Amino acid sequence: MIDAIGNLFFRVIQYSQINESIIMKKYIIISLIALLAPSVSHAHEPLYGFGPHVLFKQGFAPHITLHWNSSKFETEYALGYGITRNWTMIAETPWHIENDNYNFGGINLKSKYRFWLKTKPGISYQGSFISKLIIPKASGQPTVLNMALTTGQEALRFYWFATAGYAIKLTDNTLKPGNHLLYNISIGYRPFKVNYYKPDIVFFLETSGNTFQKSTLNSDKVTQSGGTNIAVAPTFFFTYRNFAFRGGVQFGVWDDGYVRKPETNYKLTFEVHI
């Protein structure tokens, strides 16, 4: 009898250890998937515009951006930090090559607050308020305050984003550049199914526009100033786990008034979320 009870007790312990091992393995696998898998909301946003995505709380997102055309080359180093699950702050430091010299362009401070989030299986809708302060190094250039509302949809196949904003230019100079409206509409498509352990790519078509008010000289409007330009940009967003690589080319397609359409330019960004 005692031997039978002993054997039964041993089998119970052995079964418990097996179950515990299985549970532990499942927990490890689920944890790895959650940590390493590329998320649907992995900052899939416009390259030339704004988007509503924010970082997770206490998350870091260092990134570097290369931006150039036929006459200039600019490098931007940036670091984003998730203050809360809905509020992200980003510091940017642009550098540009001019006359064979590598010059510091100033500091940009960006705040992004997500005020709306609605999720369904495989899809999310978001809305954010963005403010960006551009502080140039050169004393002759204006300080610029951008404010914008942005919203969008991120899904397994299709994306769209829409942004509308206003840029205020602050300067003590007698010649003050006109403030301007900015707007961006982007659509995106993922051609392949999302896989936890494989690279992911989304293609975008972005349309950006700016409408400039007239500049002023000694508080008088400058007649030959102001206007509108529009540009389009095919871009891509490539992610692998917590790494992201974005790129694209922008073409100016239309201008009006005394504003010229943007020169064809290229942009590449490498980003990591930690």
Image (tube, rainbow, N blue to C red):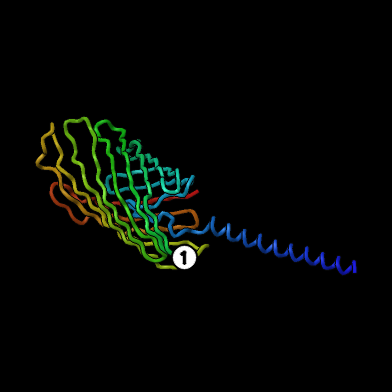
Residue found 58% across the figure and 60% down from its top: 30
Up-down relation of residue 135 to residue 29 (above or below): above
Residue 199 lies left or right of residue 113; in this view the side is right
Residue placed most toward the observer, 212 or 249: 212
Residue placed most toward the observer, 12 or 188: 12
Pointer 1 local density, CA inside 10 Å: few below 14, some 14–19, many at least 20: some
Residue 255 lies left or right of residue 49; in this view the side is left
Count up the numbered dots: 1
Of all residues, the one furthest to the front in this rendering is: 1
Residue found 25% across the figure and 43% down from its top: 167
Residue 212, given in percent of the width and then of the height, sits at 18, 45
| Image quarter of the N terminus | bottom right
- The amino acid at mark 1 is Val
Up-down relation of residue 6 to residue 232 (above or below): below
Residue placed most toward the observer, 80 or 224: 80
Give residue 140's quadrant in the image: top left
Give residue 169's quadrant in the image: top left
Residue found 28% across the figure and 40% down from its top: 145
Q: Secondary structure at mark 1?
A: loop
The residue labelled by disc 1 is 194
Residue 46, given in percent of the width and then of the height, sits at 34, 54
Residue found 31% across the figure and 33% down from its top: 137
